[in-house]
Image (cartoon, rainbow, N blue to C red):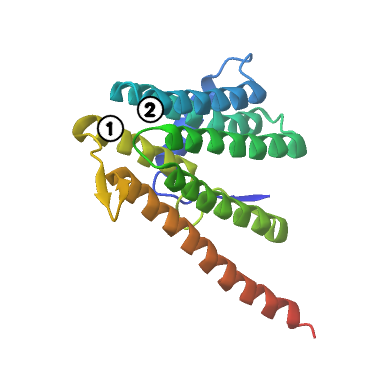
């Protein structure tokens, strides 16, 4: 299977991953790294929920995002580096743990005082729509797109870390617009969610037309 990873951070990320996998002790296995990634998502969720008590718990959320990146990015990479891939099991476990991790992170955001629950789950809906698009393209083209429109999980984590740092620096004051309480985080996350959904619809329409034309050519 061919992998496409063409995000702005992919170059630096691949260098970091290569450095880590070459130095990882043998007891660090792909399954343990997958568990590490899920633990990171739990820490993110806890950090966001505790943000209601103190904004400084966002440092815990940022730590969780780094741990989540570490486990999620290295589990498959170390399996390929050691040539111990289990293609069906590894892919199945990784994709399903990604769904659970995404739910934990967005759930933490929804329970935080910084983002409305509707906004957080709208973002989850848009992001998972793109993930499903990527998986369907993989089945049809035998190509796994880690990134879609040059945006992938690493960029999303980096943006969340940046948002958390901005909250720590400037706060997240609540505005009331047409009787609805919002923060600048709601606006930012909501715009990204809308972008995810529009990108999903665009990619589905364009590729559905292309595949229809290709399927009808032999006729």
Measuring from the top left, give residue 192's x and y in whole percent: 40, 53
Along the viewing direction, whichever of 58 and 73 lies nearer the viewer? 58
User: Is 100 rendered above or below residue 52?
Assistant: below
Label 1: few (<14), some (14–19) or many (≥20) C-alpha neighbours in 10 Å:
some
Most distant residue in the bottom direction: 219
Label 2: few (<14), some (14–19) or many (≥20) C-alpha neighbours in 10 Å:
many
* Horizontal side, residue 207 vs residue 215: left or right: left
Residue 154 visible? The answer is yes
Which residue does the numbered mark 2 point to in the structure image?
Answer: 62
Please give the name of the residue rendered at 68% of the width and 49% of the height, measured from the top-left corner.
1
Query: For numbered disc 1, what is the local secondary structure?
Result: helix
User: Which labelled disc corresponds to residue 165?
Assistant: 1
User: Is 147 rendered above or below residue 100?
Assistant: below
Please give the name of the residue rendered at 51% of the width and 53% of the height, measured from the top-left corner.
126
Residue 147 visible? The answer is no
For the C terminus, the image quarter is bottom right
Most distant residue in the front direction: 179
Q: How many numbered dots are placed on residues in this image?
A: 2
Q: Do residues under tags 1 and 2 come within 8 Å of each other at their CB atoms? A: yes
Measuring from the top left, give residue 201's x and y in whole percent: 53, 66
Distance from the alpha carbon under mark 1 to that under mark 2: 9 Å
Please give the name of the residue rendered at 61% of the width and 17% of the height, measured from the top-left corner.
28
């Amino acid at each position: 299977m061919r992998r496409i990873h063409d995000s702005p951070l992919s170059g630096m990320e691949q260098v970091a991953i290569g450095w880590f996998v070459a130095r990882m002790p043998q007891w660090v296995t792909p399954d343990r790294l997958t568990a590490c990634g899920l633990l990171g998502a739990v820490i993110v969720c806890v950090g966001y929920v505790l943000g209601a008590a103190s904004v400084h718990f966002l440092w815990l959320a940022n730590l969780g995002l780094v741990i989540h990146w570490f486990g999620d990015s290295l589990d498959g990479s170390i399996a390929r580096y050691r040539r111990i891939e289990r293609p069906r099991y590894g892919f199945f476990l990784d994709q399903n743990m990604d769904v659970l991790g995404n739910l934990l992170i967005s759930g933490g955001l929804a329970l935080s005082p910084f983002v409305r629950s509707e906004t957080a789950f709208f973002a989850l809906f848009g992001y998972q729509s793109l993930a499903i698009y990527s998986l369907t393209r993989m089945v049809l083209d035998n190509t796994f797109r880690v990134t879609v429109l040059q945006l992938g999980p690493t960029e999303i984590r980096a943006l969340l870390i940046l948002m958390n740092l901005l909250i720590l620096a400037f706060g997240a004051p609540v505005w009331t617009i047409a009787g609805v309480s919002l923060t600048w985080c709601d606006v930012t996350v909501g715009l990204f969610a809308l972008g995810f959904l529009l990108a999903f619809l665009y990619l589905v329409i364009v590729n559905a037309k292309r595949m229809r034309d290709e399927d009808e050519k032999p006729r």
